[in-house]
Each structure stands twice: as structure tokens, then as C-alpha cells.
Image (cartoon, rainbow, N blue to C red):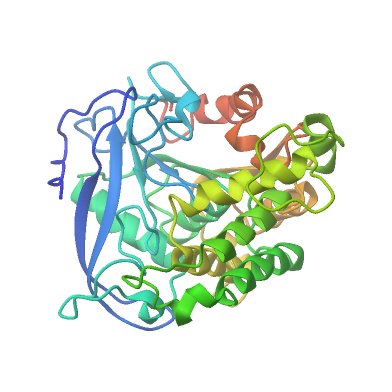
Amino acid sequence: MTPDVEAGASHAPARGCRGKGFHLIGSFEPELGGYLPEATVAYETWGELDATGENAVLVAHALTGDSHAAGGACEEYPRGGWWDPMIGPGRLIDTDRHFVVCANVLGGCSGSTGPVSEEPGDGRPYGPRFPMVTIRDMVRAQRRLLDSLGVRRLAAVVGGSIGGQQALEWAVEYPGFVRKAVPVAATGALGPQGIAMSEIGRRAIVDDPDWQGGEYYGTGRSPEKGLALARMAGMVTYQSAAGKWARFGREPASRPALHREFGGRFEVESYLHYQGRDLTGRFDANSYLYLTRAMDLYDVAAGYASPEEAYGRIGAEVLFVGISSDWLFPPGEVRAAAARAREAGADARYVEIQSDSGHDAFLKDWDQMEAAAGPFLKSSTTEDRREI
């Protein structure tokens, strides 16, 4: 394992690819039960932590993302960092000014402890014995990492989708630790439409005979077909109808067939096939089950008397970012979350990205993201006149 990066140490700028850092956060008790005798959080950093320890920005990744938020293409990451246009010198999240951290979530499969990790004293991967983890668990694990890096306060936390849920939970769970939070395409609770689509994906995985009750590690078989189908279902929710018409229309497939054809193929079908196959090569099926369930279970009011009590804890400035064509987290629901937080006394506001890209807009419409979040992140506050 790569050794921990010491607090205050110099870090490479957000270009190229670098190895992950790994931090042992010790034993961990998830809020819904279970016990992890040893837990690890994988992370990457860019920029430098200043002497105050308060110039850090935490970036939270989406469902199948990882800690490699920035950096150009390389052998390990042929597509580069998943938010590379947003992170770097002079960019929306300026690494000349800020110490940027992105951590793979607890329950993930890119270095942080998850179902694929070996259980201490057992030597076997946890598999289905891994405890259920929540968004709050992910945030609490990240807090331990930031403490180890010497971060005394977050200048901002930003994330989209499940990363947006984390950004919101940071503001609620640690009201004095966060100055600004930007939940993008996320609310305090996923609606029934999103939960339903997640369940379709999970059924595809667990009903694949190669899932083997989740104990497929080392057997030579894994639920690739189920995971691919889950990804296909997910991809349908990430794009809008207008976006699909613009990109695919009813055009016949232009890519080689990956499956036996049934009366020919449309381009949109071929696209889904390739997306499904791509995920099976880089993601663990059990992690997909756990992370989609964490996304479904998130409720900002969990553990509080009401959503108002939860939102009333927020001490940070919060910018909720909705996407006009998003039907996983519809903009009306994001706007309503911002209003509810504001009514509870939080300094919350709402902005909407106009895009046909659907839920995925925060991962591709860079100019719109800059226009939506830039003024908020770069504005001064009454408490601290420095720009973020």
C-alpha cells in the first residue's frame, strides 16, 4: 500500500496519474449495525494544505466513481480524472489555492474497505457478510481521513448524485466543520422512482446464477451479466429523453455487436451494451448492491425528530444545484429541498442547470457547472473574506 501522505505535505498538481493514498481509520461501527475491525479509506489529493488547515475542498464521487477526480489520461485511467475539467490550477476548484481531497467511499471497490476486502483474521473477502453502510457512514469515515491529513475545516464540499447526498450530509453532520456545501443533483431523500430503478438493477445482479449468494470471489465466476444489466438500467436514468433523441435518435447501431441480435440493433441499444460491459471490467457487483442501497436509504432526517431539525443544524452556506432534465433527482425536488432547508434557518439557495444531458449533466456540461457553482464558490462570506 502507498503510505499515508503527511498533513501539510506538498502534493502534485491535478495533472497526470498518481498512486492512491490509503489511510487506516481503525475499527468502524456502521450506524445500522455490524462491525469492521479494520477499515481503510483510499484517497487522492491535489494542491497543498496551508498553515491554517482550512483551505481544503472535499470532492465526493458519484455511484461508480472513485478517488481519481482529476488528472489526465494514463494507463490506469485512460479517460483521466472524472472531474478533471473542474479541478486544477485556475479552475472551478483551484489547486493553486486549495488542498483538494477525493476519497473512495466506504463500501466501494477502489481501495476503500468494501465487500471485496478481506476480513481480518478470516482471509476471505467479506462478500455478503459486509455490513450495510449509509451515506452518514461514508461521511464519518471521510472525517477520520481529513483529521489525519491535518484538515481543521473544509472550505467546501462538492459532489453530485450520491456525492451530492454526501455533501448535504457533511453540512448536517458537521455543521461547524464546513463553510460551503454544494449538493448537485441530490436531495435529502431519493424518491420512489429512483429507488425502483435501483431495485431493478439489484435484482439483475442477485438473480444472476453467477452471483452465488454474493460468495463469488475466487470461484472463477462472477455476475457479469447481472452487473451489466444493472448498469444498463442505471444509464437509462442518467440521461433525458431529449438527450437520447439528440444523441441516438432511431439510428441503427454503428458499433460491433456484443450480443446476439434480435431483429437488428439500434444505436442506443448498442451504447447500453457497451456501457454494461465496461462496468464489469472495473467495478464489483457486491459494491454496486451496497452503494445503490446506501443511496436509497439516505434520509437527511434519520436520527432527528424531523427534516426541519436536521436542516436546522446546518451552519454552512449551501447551494443546491438542480438539472432541468434530471428525472432521477427532478429539479423540482431539489428546489424543494433547498426551500425546506431555508425555512429551517439554513443559508440555502438553489440554482438550475439548463441541459438536455439529464442527471449526467454534472459530469459532462462543464461550462454550465462552472456557471452554476462558480459564483457561489468564489464569493466571500461574512465569516471569512477569502475566496474559495
Numbered circles on residues, count? 0
The image shows residue 113 at horizontal and vertical percentages of 30, 63
Tell me if I can see residue 324 in this picture. Answer: no
Taking the spot 66% from the left edge, 36% from the top edge, the residue there is 361
Q: Is residue 158 above or below residue 333?
A: above
x, y (%) of residue 167?
Answer: 50, 50
Relative to 212, 353 lies left or right: right
Left or right: 46 as drawn, with respect to 86:
left
Within the image, what quadrant is residue 144 found in? bottom left
Query: Is residue 284 at least partly visible in the picture?
Result: yes
Image point (80%, 38%), residue name: 244
Which residue is nearer to you in this view: 236 or 49?
Answer: 236
Q: Position of residue 49 (x, y in %)?
A: 24, 33
Residue 50 picture quarter:
top left
- Give the vertical position of 27 relative to 280 (above or below): below
Depth check: 207 or 129 in front?
207
Which quarter of the figure has residue 343? bottom right
Relative depth, front residue between 220 and 313: 220
